[in-house]
Image (cartoon, helix red, strand yellow):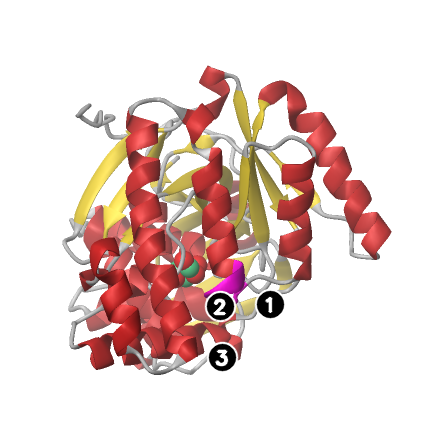
Amino acid sequence: MTMASVPSVPSVPSVNSSAAAAFRRHIDVAPTGVWSAPGRVNLIGEHTDYNGGYVLPFAIDRRTDVAASRRADGIVRVVSLQKPDDVVTADVAGLRPGDRRDWSAYVLGTVWALRDAGLDIGGMDLVVDGGVPVGSGLSSSAALECAVALAATELHDIEISREALARISQRAENDYVGVPCGLMDQMAVSVCRAGHALFFDVRDDVREYEPFAPEESGFALLVIDTRAQHAHSGGEYAARRRSCEAAAARLGVPSLRDISVDQLIDALAELDDEELRKRTRHVVTENARVLTARELLRARKLSELGATLTASHMSLRDDFEVTCPELDLAVDTALNSGALGARMTGGGFGGCAIALVAADAAPVVSSQVEQAFANSGFRPPKIMVPNVADGVLRIA
Ligand code: GLA
């Protein structure tokens, strides 16, 4: 077996950050630093993280920057370039889950979670420049949480691993914002490295970097933002989680991760509920597909990855039932116009699909998808080919 390469820790480039410029305008001095966290795309392994399973995400070069300095008065003051009229202030010692329900909950929730973990975080001025599209399933919330978490800990000279940072950011989202997400997004945003996908075994807490640079072997990974709304907190995501937990309980295992493909037929026979059977079949087969995808990445055989991606979409559509007409149309059209494989990515119910294509086919596949959306009366999709980027880091 090829050993996965372990890329070096990213360096700190110096940049002209618009968050830093805005900080100077708002606060009148330069910030102590600027921290930057990426969005993520999940290559494969969907709705497996909260089942203790495998995921294979990578970070993208759409980033959220946070310019920050400490304050002596115990107040957190947050401004976002995307909501310039909204200046949010709060006393750090008085933060409580549920205080805020808007964008600032991701910031204040992270400060709350850091303090709740026993870390001595005081007042800060924070200026946010969110460059990860919101509501597209590219983890703009995890990017904001992780950028704030790294800024806050470094400003207070607190040494904390990226893994711990990811778990604290997830806690902010689960317990302050109130979204019952798994750990994939925050882990990807925290520890991903350029040119690599992150293989993460959630139950066993194993992380490995697998080479992933489609452009180096003549491919492109299109990210098709369907611009259909997804609503995790709207109940469907939580309902899927509950079904998986119910199935695991009936099968007498801690989580569906503990059922292997070889045990699947027997497990399905034990479940008397068709919905639970479908959810179980998705999770068990999806975990197997992640392992297949990891081997193909290691062997640098992207040309063979397509069928596995497409099988994942079918399973999410038919068994897990988290796709929507826009996602299905994006996938079907990409496949019909030459993509090697395609699938929805993220939580589903809208958001993005990905399509693996030969680089020279990218324009044709993109225009066919745009045409199909126009013919169906859907909003025009936004199609990008992101670079595979580094996780959270200080940039200035
Ligand atoms: C969202 C959640 C993740 C994961 C995916 C589905 O992105 O935040 O934890 O469950 O959905 O794979």
Q: Nearer the viewer, mark 1 or mark 3?
A: 3
For label 1, the residue is 86
For label 3, the residue is 235
How packed mark 3 is, by other alpha carbons closer than 10 Å (few <14, some 14-19, many 20 or more), is few
Front in this rendered view, residue 185 or 48: 48
Q: Is residue 107 above or below residue 237?
A: above
- Drawn side of residue 39 relative to residue 154, left or right: right
- Drawn side of residue 48 relative to residue 233, left or right: left
Q: Position of residue 151 (x, y in %)?
A: 33, 50
CA separation in Å, label 1 and label 3: 28 Å
Circles 1 and 2: CB atoms closer than 8 Å: yes
Which numbered dot is residue 36? none
Which label's residue is closer to the chain start, 1 or 2?
A: 1
Tell me where residue 354 sits by quadrant: top right
- Drawn side of residue 364 relative to residue 138, left or right: right
In the rendered structure, which amino acid carries the disc numbered 3? Gly
Q: Residue at x 63, y 63 (%)?
A: 324
Magenta stretch in the rendered image: 317-322
Main secondary-structure element of the magenta-colored stretch: loop
CA separation in Å, label 2 and label 3: 22 Å
In the rendered structure, which amino acid carries the disc numbered 2? Ser
